[in-house]
Image (cartoon, coloured by chain):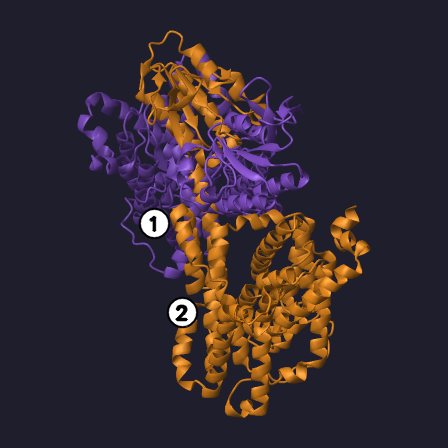
Chain colours: A purple, B orange
Amino acid sequence: MNLKRYLPILQWAPDYDRSQATSDMVAAVIVTVMLIPQSLAYALLAGLPAHIGLYASILPLALYAIFGTSRTLSVGPVAVVSLMTAAALAPLAEAGSPEYVAGAVLLAVISGLMLTLMGMLRLGFLANFLSHPVISGFISASGIVIAASQLKHIFGVQASGQNLLTIGQSLIQSIGDANLPTVLIGTGALLFLMFARSQLKPLLIRAGVNARSADILTKTAPILAVLVTTLVAWQLRLDTQGVRLVGVVPSGLPDLTMPSMDWGLWQQLALSALLISIVGFVESVSVGQTLAAKRRQRIDPDQELIGLGAANLGAGFSGGMPVTGGFSRSVVNFDAGAETPAAGAYAAAGIALATLFLTPAIAYLPQATLAATIIVAVFTLIDLPALKRTWRYSKADFGAMLATILLTLAHSVEAGITAGVVLSMGLFLYRTSRPHSAVVGRVPGTEHFRNVLRHDVELCPAVTFLRVDESLYFANARFLEETVMALATRKPELKDLVLVCPAVNHIDASALESLEAINERLKDAGVRFHLSEVKGPVMDRLKGTELLSHLGGQIYLSTFEAWQTLTNNCVKSAA
Amino acid sequence: MNLKRYLPILQWAPDYDRSQATSDMVAAVIVTVMLIPQSLAYALLAGLPAHIGLYASILPLALYAIFGTSRTLSVGPVAVVSLMTAAALAPLAEAGSPEYVAGAVLLAVISGLMLTLMGMLRLGFLANFLSHPVISGFISASGIVIAASQLKHIFGVQASGQNLLTIGQSLIQSIGDANLPTVLIGTGALLFLMFARSQLKPLLIRAGVNARSADILTKTAPILAVLVTTLVAWQLRLDTQGVRLVGVVPSGLPDLTMPSMDWGLWQQLALSALLISIVGFVESVSVGQTLAAKRRQRIDPDQELIGLGAANLGAGFSGGMPVTGGFSRSVVNFDAGAETPAAGAYAAAGIALATLFLTPAIAYLPQATLAATIIVAVFTLIDLPALKRTWRYSKADFGAMLATILLTLAHSVEAGITAGVVLSMGLFLYRTSRPHSAVVGRVPGTEHFRNVLRHDVELCPAVTFLRVDESLYFANARFLEETVMALATRKPELKDLVLVCPAVNHIDASALESLEAINERLKDAGVRFHLSEVKGPVMDRLKGTELLSHLGGQIYLSTFEAWQTLTNNCVKSAA
């Protein structure tokens, strides 16, 4: 039972049959064709030699098939995590240098260890602290930064930078050195891919191809661009024209690599690895959950941490880079009919074959083609309407989102995501620190009580009913004290104050002390302090506290009961 | 009106009369007598020359009388803030050196600027994020560290350290050099002060002194200890015996000093100044509020920030150290009958006179006496029963408290308070991320709905009522999705799911997206999604969202209404 939880492969492998195998293999072929250019491109985006992307698409996929719980998630290099890898490594070494590659390997290992540990400690809930607007803003902004960072490859110039400002500046300075053949290849690939994304599918359908095949054919456009531009570059010896190609890469499968044991480097990369882990996990779980729900399956977020942890450890020990579950590939895998994680293992075999036999051809692949595939791919990440939607619904959420976007664009991905998390937590704490509260009166002839400012209700001058619409805890304890004491000092005729608690889900130690202080101060002022509609779990904890033993008034099950008891001798007036 | 808010002195000064002046002056004399040894001692505790304490007790008191809102708060050097000052300056320079003194001045200036700015921006609520258990644990632990740090003066040895471990180690290494006359003076003063605190008052009362005078006389014990030991030290020329005395201090009032303009130093001290500001503010406001409530007065926390900010700026520009409102002195001031902040201004005049005429005598004051007054004073800060009380009421709050105490004792005051704040926020977020939720059924024959696990209630197999007892926001949005979808997958006969929302005070953008996702997924599964008992303000915001326009089901004002509509054709069963 427990073994099945930690080794989800045992849940499906025993009943694996030929029909499932056929479906999985078909999906794997399509995913492999998509993954080859993506893995090369995302390695380039991370500032790494292209073949590192292939290395990160073999062992990680096989390990995720054993430890992961999503049936259709496609693990491997993805755009946002690759950008974060580049940002983490930029201060350490020059892109592409052996130290830089060693840093990427170490980042994958640390991230793998963190994810596995978080999974074993069942810390999947940590991902909940990334709010939707923050993650959406972060991904949109990352998409923009990624697209901008690839323009240098389209123009064939040297440029650098980790944010829109530095990238822009660097591009403007170097644009004069643009290489014409590179620009032709880059913009050609870009236009072709944009055309394929928006026009190819309807054209194929009109030509008589059925919808599903048309969809899948459209997805092969990047590999087509890769094939054509590689052939052109080889035939015309474009490297002699100043077109930058991927160049000779080591052929053969990756060797087992040991990560650096330099403790200082581990410390330097720890925070980046944590951010990469959490962002990768959130992205992966969102895709996994959406796809699982469509087939009424479920994924286990804590086991997903272990699955992604194993994948990253696999990436690290086979000379790869940080990986996670990618959105577009997973959707293709799902649509192509993948039924079990075995599809991922078959795709790993496909990439292994490519690594063994296709690397000589890859040497002639222009970097501009890869940049074009990245730019077109990240367009789908940018969701600007989300800004408008969020603005309309909640100004606070919009604030957190905007801060995330601006900092990601203008400073760095790490600053953006950190500010978003801190700000959204702070805004939540701030909001709950000033809860909605209302003096309520009785709706005449009923047992209902409503805000005196919004409704015509009955009141009794000597009794005040105060309803607080929030759990009571340290951040609003002082607010509570001030609200109650302001009511008491304002009304000298006050004899009874009832705190109406149906929305109080919890009272922490600070709020308990505040309630005790309120009780004592009201006693000194000759006012009895009562509570009504205290929830069962809250009441259970209050038993045995000083508040209950010293309470000046009573605890009433319902506010109406308190009203009947306390307002007996009262001339009621309408508010 | 507005002027009166920013200059609270205008609220009382125009009606100030002779009777108030008399009361204030009596209180001021008593507070001055108490403040002289305290200000010297706390300067020593902060690692500063003793007269800096006097400097910090003149201008700050006068400025607080103009800008502060508490009628009875006694501002000046206090134990915890002095300890924090020492902790902030220790890494910068050797205690007592000119750079060290300049650091203390700068700390007061930065803290004063921060407090004033926070007051003008109305950021008084920031103090709410220090929970009671954290502040109580922090003050207890600081008391222990302070007492330990003073033992070196009692033994007359050289020792250092910022936490219990380093102080203890340092003391053990140096204890062999203990100086006998110092030990005699120190333990003598300690025993006398302990006797005075616990036994003197009842003795005086039995001797016929009335209770209030006995109380005030007891409070003069420290000045008596100072006088006696100073005389002894002078007569016996104890400095030639190796007893460390306060030594010659500059006589005369402090000069106006300009703080250092070294920007690097400002940056180094910024975080410490922020912590000192917030801790000082919380301590001060707690005392101020407690005393104000006793006389049915109120204080304005935001204006208190400005008052304390002015006091610290005054301290900085007159060569002093960070100050705040002290607990014991304020209580004495209150009990002695102070009626307006003018009492503080008179005490400032008293300290000014002492600075002008008593400094030659102070030269012979043994440091051991001051250490004894500190040790006895901080005993009142240590509240260990609070640990037990908190443990019994809330394990989470106890965890935050214990972490604060252990880190303060074993690492540093700054680590302790920071860990406490972060941990208590994290625990609150964690708790609200896994809210209490229950499937509810109808209490037969009523309009009430209760947890099916706790009560005998009516159920309908095709309709599930789920109540969530928490606001819905990013940290519990995924929890909500998982809870609802688990219910839906578990019951294939389900046709309607009602989310019962009386405890939902807020729905943020993340939770809105989750509700939309739940609605869509339930639709796919042939289940209608309904809401009931949505609060007015929450409903207002939901209007115009996709959730409402695409909702599979209805919104019901009451759960009973939903029950009547949805369970019409249902064979009800008891749970």
Q: Nearer the viewer, residue B172 or A264?
A: B172
Q: Is residue B434 visible?
A: no
Q: Is residue A454 above or below residue B422?
A: above
Q: Nearer the viewer, residue B160 or A406?
A: B160
Q: Nearer the viewer, residue B89 or A44?
A: B89
Q: Amino acid at mark 2?
A: Leu
The tag on residue B165 is 2
Q: Is residue A390 above or below residue B30?
A: above
The residue positioned 46% from the left and 16% from the top of the image is B560
Q: Amino acid at mark 1?
A: Val
Expressed as whole percent of the image width and height from the top left, the position of residue A423 reads 55, 43
The residue positioned 59% from the left and 89% from the top of the image is B234
Q: Report crowding for label 1: few under 14, some 14 to 19, many 20 or more residues within 10 A (C-alpha).
A: many
Chain letter for mark 2: B
The tag on residue A109 is 1
Q: Is residue B200 visible?
A: yes
Relative to residue B243, is residue B433 drawn left or right?
left
The residue positioned 64% from the left and 76% from the top of the image is B51
Chain letter for mark 1: A
Q: Residue furthest left?
A: A14
Q: Secondary structure at mark 2?
A: helix
Question: Could you give the CA–CA distance between mark 1 and mark 2, rounded to whole angstroms?
Answer: 36 Å
Q: Is residue B449 above or below residue A160?
A: above
Expressed as whole percent of the image width and height from the top left, the position of residue B476 reads 44, 34
